Amino acid sequence: KNEVEQSPQNLTAQEGEFITINCSYSVGISALHWLQQHPGGGIVSLFMLSSGKKKHGRLIATINIQEKHSSLHITASHPRDSAVYICAVSPPGQFYFGTGTSLTVIP
Amino acid sequence: GAGVSQSPSNKVTEKGKDVELRCDPISGHTALYWYRQSLGQGLEFLIYFQGNSAPDKSGLPSDRFSAERTGGSVSTLTIQRTQQEDSAVYLCASSLRTGAEQYFGPGTRLTVT
C-alpha cells in the first residue's frame, strides 16, 4: 500500500507549456513537501505546505487537506526544469514519499 | 554559508563489512534526517533526530542499522555486516527545527560487492 501516489510517472512537455503534477495521499499529515531532484544531482526542497497555496517564481503548489491532494504547477516551462519531482508527506515523526514524476522539457 | 555535507561521497565495501556514514548538518539546525534511495526506487525515510534524540527508530530497515548524533551536530549512520541489498544512496537532511524546511546533503553512494 502506497501512502503517497503521484501522477503522471513521466511527463514530456514543450518549452513554454504549463505543467501540472498531482499528488494524493492517504494518511493524516502535518505537512506536504515538494522536492526536486536533477539527474545525478542532489535534492532540493521546493515547497513545504500544510494548507492553501504557495508560489515561488514560476512554481506554484496547492494543497487540499480535505481531499488529501496536492498539485505542483510549473508555468512557462523551460528545459532547465527537467528533473524528477517528488511529493512527500510528513505525519508526525514519519515521512512517506511518492515515486516521483520524471519531467523532460524539450526546447 | 555551508550546506549539509556528507562523507564519504562514495563507498564500496565487501559484503559482511561494517560501514559508517557521516552527516554534518547546517550549523544551528536542531533536526536531522536520514533517508535511503535505492537504485530505481523511491526515497525511504530511515530515522530523524531532534537534538541528540531519535524518538522513533522503527524506520531503520534492520537491527544491522544504527544511528547516533552527538553534540546536537554531526550524525553517523552505521551499517553492520553489510548486505548487497544495502546498496543505495544514503541522504541526510537538516532543518532548523522539526517540521521546518529541510536542506539535503549530496548523499553517500554505498555499493556492497
Image (cartoon, rainbow, N blue to C red):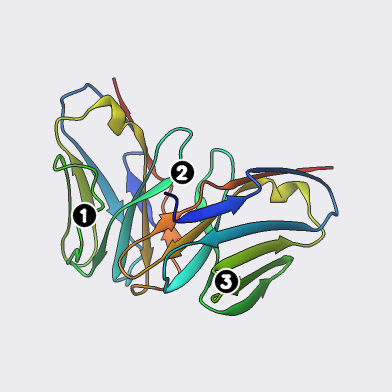
Instruction: Name which residue lies at 46% across and 38% down.
Output: B41
Q: Secondary structure at mark 2?
A: loop
Q: Secondary structure at mark 1?
A: loop
Say which quadrant the C terminus of chain A sits in: top right
Residue marked by disc 3: A67
Q: Which mark is residue B42?
A: 2
Amino acid type at mark 2: Gly
Are dots 3 and 2 in contact, CB under 8 Å? no
Residue marked by disc 1: B58
Question: Residue A53: which quarter of the image?
Answer: bottom right
Amino acid type at mark 1: Ser
Counting labels gives 3
Question: Residue A9: which quarter of the image?
Answer: top right
Are both tags, 2 and 1, on one chain? yes
Q: Position of residue B15 (x, y in %)?
A: 21, 22
**Cα distance in 3D space between marks 2 and 1:** 18 Å
Label 1 crowd (10 A; few <14 / some 14-19 / many >=20): few
Which chain letter goes with mark 3? A
